Structure formats: C-alpha cells, structure tokens
Image (cartoon, rainbow, N blue to C red):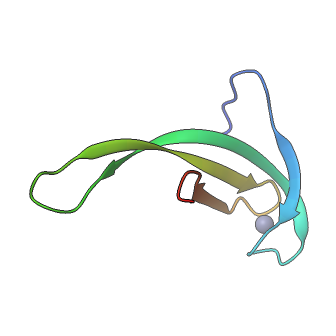
Amino acid sequence: MATTDGVANGMTEPCDECGIETLHEVSVQLVTEAADGENARYSREPYRVRECQRCGNRDSQRMNNV
Ligand SMILES: [Zn+2]
C-alpha cells in the first residue's frame, strides 16, 4: 500500500531483512491499542512505520515509550 498524501519520506536506513542499508519510506500512523485489564482503555499511540523499498519489509516502532 503506497498511498501517500503528498510528502513521500525517503530515508536510508538499515533493513533487518536485507542486512544492508536500503531506502525506506517512513510515515507516522496512529495505532489504536487496547490495554490489558478489566477496564479496557483504548489509546491511540503514534507509531513510526517504515517500509523497505527493496524487499517490502515493514516494521513499526512506538514513538512515545521513553
Ligand atoms: Zn529490506
């Protein structure tokens, strides 16, 4: 899925699958998370999603877990 609203963000980053630095498309998505427990709280957390333009591998990393 390569829909971009305007800005395509190309970055060269190491890819786990390729084992080398490749061009990645980087975007930020809000992911709805369900918290564990009885009073299920849902929160939307920003994730940094990157997709390798060589092999198509995607991974996401939560941005505010510091
Ligand atoms: Zn790759």
Above or below residue 21? Residue 11 is above
Question: Is 53 left, or right, of 66 in this rendering?
Answer: right
Can you tell which quarter of the image residue 12 is in? bottom right
Q: How many marks?
A: 0
Residue found at x 27% / y 44%: 42
Q: Position of residue 25 (x, y in %)?
A: 77, 46
Q: Position of residue 35 (x, y in %)?
A: 26, 56
Q: Quadrant of ligand 1?
A: bottom right
Above or below residue 14? Residue 28 is above
Viewport quadrant of the N terminus? top right
Question: Is 6 left, or right, of 33 in this rendering?
Answer: right
**Residue ranking furthest to the front:** 66
Q: Nearer the viewer, residue 38 or 4?
A: 38
Above or below residue 14? Residue 34 is above
Residue found at x 63% / y 49%: 48
**Residue ranking furthest to the left:** 38
Q: Position of residue 63 (x, y in %)?
A: 59, 51
Question: Is 37 left, or right, of 25 in this rendering?
Answer: left
Can you tell which quarter of the image residue 3 is in? top right
**Residue ranking furthest to the top:** 6
Viewport quadrant of the C terminus? bottom right
Q: Nearer the viewer, residue 17 or 46?
A: 46
